[in-house]
Image (tube, helix red, strand yellow):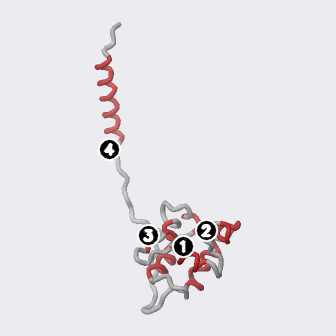
């Protein structure tokens, strides 16, 4: 029995490309994220780091000693603001590119540690200039 290697390779390549085309013709439908929260404040009001942001860190980031000094950034009260500002975790020019925001949003490693409202609050705080107030 004589096998034509060239015809076999062409047949295998044809099967591969045909199956690739068949299985890759699907697409994912991108739907709006229903968990997006928009924080709106009265005119002239801004979020307070001490009252609005630090409590998020205290409740979600300090457990089992994670960001309480052993893992950067230190998000414990009295340390967190300086850590965030000097460690370049905040980008007020492009708030959504702030690393502190990116790690708690889709694809971030800490996404399960903040809910949609907390993520929106942190983003709004950064958009408003990330003040230490």
Calculate the distance from the C-alpha at mark 4 to the C-alpha at mark 1.
44 Å
Q: Name the residue under label 3.
A: 97
Q: Mark 2 points at which residue?
A: 72
SS category of the residue bearing label 3 = helix
- Pick whichever of labels 2 and 1 is earlier in the sequence: 2
User: Left of 57 or right of it: where is 12?
Assistant: left
Query: Which residue is situated farthest in the top direction here?
Result: 1
Q: Name the residue under label 4.
A: 25
Locate residue 130, reporting x and y percent: 49, 82
- Pick whichever of labels 2 and 4 is earlier in the sequence: 4
Q: Which of 97 and 10 is in front in this view?
A: 97
Q: Nearer the viewer, residue 116 or 81?
A: 81
Locate residue 52, reporting x and y percent: 57, 82
State which mark lies toward you, 3 or 4: 3
In this view, 14 is above or below 34? above
Query: Which residue is situated farthest in the right direction here?
Result: 64
Calculate the distance from the C-alpha at mark 2 to the C-alpha at mark 1.
9 Å
Calculate the distance from the C-alpha at mark 2 to the C-alpha at mark 4.
44 Å
When asked about the image quadrant of residue 33, the answer is bottom left
Circle 4 crowding by C-alpha within 10 Å: few under 14, some 14–19, many from 20? few
- Pick whichever of labels 4 and 1 is earlier in the sequence: 4
Q: In percent of the image, x 63 and y 71: which residue is there?
A: 60
- Pick whichever of labels 2 and 3 is earlier in the sequence: 2
Locate residue 43, reporting x and y percent: 42, 92
- Pick whichever of labels 3 and 4 is earlier in the sequence: 4
Q: In percent of the image, x 34 and y 46: which residue is there?
A: 26
User: Left of 78 or right of it: where is 36?
Assistant: left
Q: In percent of the image, x 37 and y 53: which residue is there?
A: 28
Calculate the distance from the C-alpha at mark 2 to the C-alpha at mark 3.
18 Å
Image quadrant holding the N terminus, namely top left
Label drawn at residue 87: 1
């Amino acid at each position: 029995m004589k096998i034509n290697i060239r015809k076999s390779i062409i047949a295998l390549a044809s099967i591969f490309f045909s199956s690739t085309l068949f299985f890759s013709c699907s697409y994912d439908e991108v739907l709006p994220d229903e968990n997006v929260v928009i924080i709106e404040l009265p005119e002239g009001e801004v979020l307070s780091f001490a009252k609005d942001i630090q409590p998020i860190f205290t409740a979600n980031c300090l457990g089992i000693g994670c960001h309480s000094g052993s893992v950067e950034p230190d998000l414990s009260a009295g340390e967190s603001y300086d850590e965030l500002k000097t460690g370049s975790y905040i980008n007020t020019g492009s708030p959504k590119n702030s690393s502190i925001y990116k790690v708690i949003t889709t694809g971030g490693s800490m996404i399960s540690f903040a809910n949609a409202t907390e993520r929106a609050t942190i983003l709004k705080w950064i958009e408003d200039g990330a003040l230490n107030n």
